[in-house]
Every structure is written in structure tokens, then in C-alpha cells.
Amino acid sequence: MERRRRKRRRDVWLGFSILLKIMGACVICCAIFFAMTVFFKIQRITVTGDNPYSNEDVIAASGIETGENTFFLNKFAAIAKIYQECPYIDTIVMRRHLPSELEIAVTKCIGIAQIEFEGFNYIIDKNGKILAKKEASDANRYINVLGCEPNTMEIGKYIDFLQKEKEKTLLNVLLMAQKYGIIEQIENVNIDKLYNLTFEYTDRFTVVLGSAEKMEDKFKLLLAVEGELALAERGTIDISDTENIRFRPK
């Protein structure tokens, strides 16, 4: 009988102990929630990095306002809004600096090529993002892209060609040109025939790439061939066959 009573008292104490622990955990959670909602409110928003817009424009585009809770902020929605309103921004990173500061770090897109569509030249960056629409006379410092057939061109979006293979090929050419530091020396990239890609280079050469295969090898060969030619030489560098490189002087 005594044993049963002791067991009953242990069970009661165990249940009471568990209840106290649950209540304690609830109190702690409520305290944390209260602290987050009351103390961690955004009081200052800063914009850092290579910003092509004013800081005020970026903050306004984000839709974020002071007084919002930094932990309940939907960063992904805010970033999407900035991209939509500010197409010249390339990357966006939001950082919380507790207790009350939010940093928006940005880098800018750099226009490198232009595509003619419906009477306008559309400026794109290395990733094919459409940055601006300009009159032909305003866009002559960019690489001309020839032989593509855009389906649509919308600022802030990415290129959309009727032939998707041409999109991939163009971006690969731009990527290689940037990687090997010659993007500013290229003009008139012609992707009309995917088996006969060409571009003008340094105002001295027409470069024949042929197909899009072995693209990186071809750019390496181009730099090697250029280094072997005299400064006064002009003509066509044909690297379509990486095993049989040809130079035809003008």
C-alpha cells in the first residue's frame, strides 16, 4: 500500500515537473517573440556597392520602410521588386545588422551589346539581361549582334530569341570575350548561321569561329595567333578548325 502511495506521489511530481518545464518554455518563447517584435525594428536602411541609381530610388523600389520588423521582412519579395524597378542592378544582397539596421548591397549591370528590334537598339549585359532601349544613334558604342531573331524584348527581362540555340551561343561568345579580356575590342558578332559564327576584332581582323564547339579553345587560339602577327597586319583569322588555323591577309 505504501509503495503505491509513493509511486503515485512520484507520478504527480513528474507530471508537475513536466508542466513547469512546458510553461517555462512557453514563457521564454513569448519573451523572445516580444523582443523580436518590439526591439528589432528597422530604423536605418543603407545602400552600398556600385549603385547605378540613387540610394533613395533603390530603397523605394524595395518597398521596405523603417519601422518594419527585421526578422519578419520578406527579403526575396523585396529583392524581386528592386530588380523589376531597377534593371541596371546586377546583384542584390540584403544583410541585417542587429538590432535595427538593414543593408542593401548592390552591383551594377554593364551594357556590352546591342540588338536591333522593331526599330530600336536594346542594350544587354553579359548575361543577356535587357537594360535599356535606345535610338540607333545613341547605342553605337556597344557590340552589334547580327543575325538573331528576337521573339520579344522587355527591359528588365532576359533575351528571348525564336531560336534558343542562338541565345546560348551569343551568351557563350560574350562570356569568353569577357573572360579573356577582349570584350571591348569586339564588334559585329554575327550569329545568323550557327555553323559560321564570326565577329570583328580590334578594327583589324575578321574572326571566323565556325560552330559553337570548343569555344574556349578557339578564344585561346585567337589570342595566340594575334600575338604572332605584326601590328600592321590585317585580315581574317579562321579558327573554325582548331587543328588547322588559317590567316588570310587583307
Image (tube, rainbow, N blue to C red):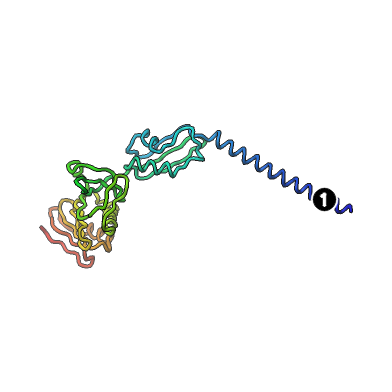
- In the rendered structure, the answer to whether residue 104 lies left or right of residue 138 reads right
Q: Residue at x 47, y 35 (%)?
A: 101
For this orientation, the residue located farthest to the bottom is 243
- In the rendered structure, the answer to whether residue 2 lies left or right of residue 224 reads right
Count every numbered label the image shows and give the total.
Answer: 1
For this orientation, the residue located farthest to the left is 250
For this orientation, the residue located farthest to the right is 1
Q: Horizontal and vertical percent for residue 244? A: 20, 67
- Which residue matches tag 1? 8
Q: Horizontal and vertical percent for residue 135? A: 19, 42
Q: Amino acid at mark 1?
A: Arg
Task: Name the foreground residue: 93 vs 158.
Answer: 158
Q: Residue at x 24, y 48 (%)?
A: 113
Q: Horizontal and vertical percent for residue 34? A: 59, 36
Task: Name the foreground residue: 49 vs 193.
Answer: 193
Q: Residue at x 85, y 53 (%)?
A: 4
Q: Horizontal and vertical percent for residue 164? A: 29, 58
Q: Quadrant of residue 16?
A: top right
Element under label 1?
A: helix
Which quadrant of the figure contains the C terminus? bottom left
- In the rendered structure, the answer to whether residue 4 lies left or right of residue 67 reads right
- Mark 1 Cα within 10 Å, few/some/many (few <14, many 20+)? few
Tell me if residue 195 comes above or below residue 11 in the rendering: below
Q: Quadrant of residue 233?
A: bottom left
Tell me if residue 247 comes above or below residue 146 in the rendering: below
